Amino acid sequence: MTSILLIANPAAGGGRVPNLLPSVRRKLDALGIQHRTGLTSSLDDAVRLTNEALDQGEIPVAFSGDGVAGVVARTASYRPESVFGVLPGGTGNDFCGHVGIPDDPIEACEVLASGVPTTIDLGEANGVRFLGIASFGYDSLANESANAAPRWLGSGVYIWGAISAVIRWKPAHFTVTADGAEKSFDGWSVLCANTSRYGGGMLIAPNASIEDHQFDLICTLDSSRLRFIRMFPKVFKGTHIDDNNLDVSHAREVVVSADRPFTIYADGDPLTELPAEIRIIPSAVKVLLPA
């Protein structure tokens, strides 16, 4: 197969990537995969390394968390017929969880050897492409807190972020126009889901697909903190989705605004600000997925 460039973030997963790199390299050697490694210290490095790999006919492989995976996917999507790969190296690894890439990066190397290049959709918010779920409102506060939490918490940073955001949350008013149909409501959050998971395993959009050319649009309506907290544990199994405090629909193009500023987060990182136009980009890029 074509050789690969591992785009590795040494800080990902609480700094575990450097410890895993030797084992990953040995596994790639055993599989007969030519490879080299590029280290990142910023998302801009991931853009540069992805373009470098594609220029040299290599497959860029994100060995980090969802943030780097999203940047690699975004960058590759502007290069016709390009293919990228993902090894789980971050705290959440939600894209890997959605598509069935093993949690163990050593085991996941098998996908780079025998995986199938599969065409998937991407999202785009105010012109910036993303891989998984774009969300804002309560989620803006939760992401902000999770990103600021101590890294030694591991995947617990997402629980930290969720609890901190509940404490600080004040009701907001949202206006959402989905494929031309407008709805205006008081609530907690709005999500445009291309994939099913975020926040280290929260199955927030259990029916979302990266191949159906549409978002699962999930609006959490106004409720008491107590009701919101009671619904929260169900998110890890996806059983929350039938709660009547959720407005669930599908859309290809969404225009969103709110009564105060919010940052839209996607793939664990800040993406853009409200107001925003969010759209699905069908069949945007190819990724190596389990056969």
Image (spheres, rainbow, N blue to C red):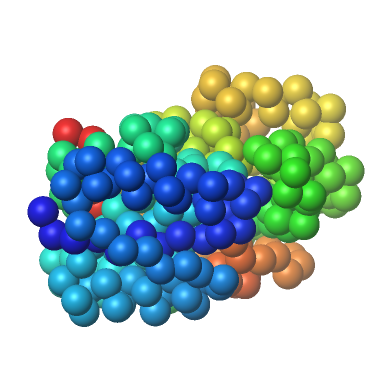
Residue shown at 29%/78% (left/top)?
A: 52
Q: Would you say residue 153 is visible in this rendering? A: yes
Q: Position of residue 57 (x, y in %)?
A: 16, 71
Residue shown at 68%/40% (left/top)?
A: 154
Q: Would you say residue 112 is visible in this rendering? A: no
Residue 145 or 291: which is nearer the viewer?
291
Residue shown at 75%/44% (left/top)?
A: 152
| Above or below, 231 relative to 177 | above
Q: Position of residue 239 (x, y in %)?
A: 54, 20
Query: Quick one: which residue is furthest to the right in this view?
Result: 167
Residue shown at 60%/28% (left/top)?
A: 235
Q: Quadrant of the N terminus?
A: bottom left
Q: Is residue 90 left or right of residue 22?
A: right
Residue 285 or 185: which is nearer the viewer?
285
Q: Is residue 135 left or right of residue 79?
A: right
| Above or below, 291 relative to 238 | below
Q: Is residue 222 left or right of residue 217?
A: right
